[in-house]
Image (spheres, rainbow, N blue to C red):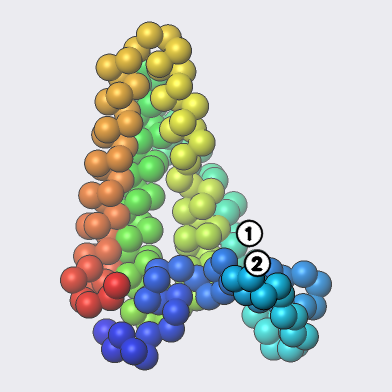
Amino acid sequence: MVAPAARKGWQAGLTPPNAGHSVTAGANICRQGAWAGAICEQESKEEMGTSLYHMLLVCLGAALGGAARFFLSGLVGRRFGETFPWGTMAVNVSGALAIGIVAGTAARHDLPGLWAFAVTGGLGSYTTVSSFSLQTLALARDGEWLRAGGNILLSLVLTLAAAAVGLALGGLWGSGAS
């Protein structure tokens, strides 16, 4: 494991490089200060190439993640029925496990390309809080309060547990990363 002092910011916080810190517009990267406004720097050709590469990784991951979501959610729904959103839960729990594994691996081995492909692209289009929200509200609207509450409770507990297991499998849980 990389020593905490040597960890890059995105590894320590489990977020990708520049997440929430810069906005890419054309060939400029503008870093946002708390109250100081934005300081823009000209992006080098190498940085632009890396940005385009990561964008392609995100697009490829999103295409694969969306297709995987469609497949798994439909498969589970056909197998267990649609009276409870089992398909969405299966997708979100498996996605939480996968994001834990990828976060641990990407942070331990400094792999921002893996983060772009698997987390931002693949798991971003695979997991689905919007479907969870809509299906929970539909259950509540139909008077299925116990199922709506069960969906909320199971989704929260199972996705957090799956992410923790994923982090442990990825080697980051308990390794001193915080």
In the foreground, 29 or 55: 29
Label 2 residue SS:
helix
Q: Is residue 29 left or right of residue 77?
A: right
Residue 103, picture quadrant? bottom left
Callouts 1 and 2 close, C-beta under 8 Å: yes
Residue 33: name its quadrant. bottom right
| Residue 2 point in image, percent of width and height | 31, 87
Closest to the observer, 111 or 145: 145
- Residue most toward the right? 26
**Secondary element at tag 1:** helix
Q: Quadrant of the N terminus?
A: bottom left
Residue 144: horizontal and vertical position, in percent?
34, 12
Residue type at tag 1? Cys
Picture coordinates of residue 142, whole percent (x, y) = 42, 9
Q: Is residue 83 above or below residue 87?
A: above
Q: Nearer the viewer, residue 177 or 47?
A: 177
The residue positioned 29% from the left and 89% from the top of the image is 3
Q: Amino acid at mark 2?
A: Leu
Q: Residues within 10 Å of mark 2 (few under 14, many from 20)?
A: some
Can you say which quadrant of the picture contains the C terminus? bottom left
Q: Which residue is mark 1?
A: 59
Picture layout, residue 99 above or below residue 18: above
Query: Mark 1: few, some, or many residues within 10 Å (few <14, many ≥20)?
Result: some
The image quadrant of residue 174 is bottom left
Q: Along the line of sight, which residue is nearer the eye, 176 or 103?
A: 176
* Residue plotted at (30% across, 40% down): 156
Q: Is residue 123 above or below residue 25?
A: above
* Residue at position x 51%, y 56% in the image: 122
Q: Report x, y in % for residue 72.
A: 42, 38
Q: Residue furthest top?
A: 143
**Mark 2 sits on what residue?**
56
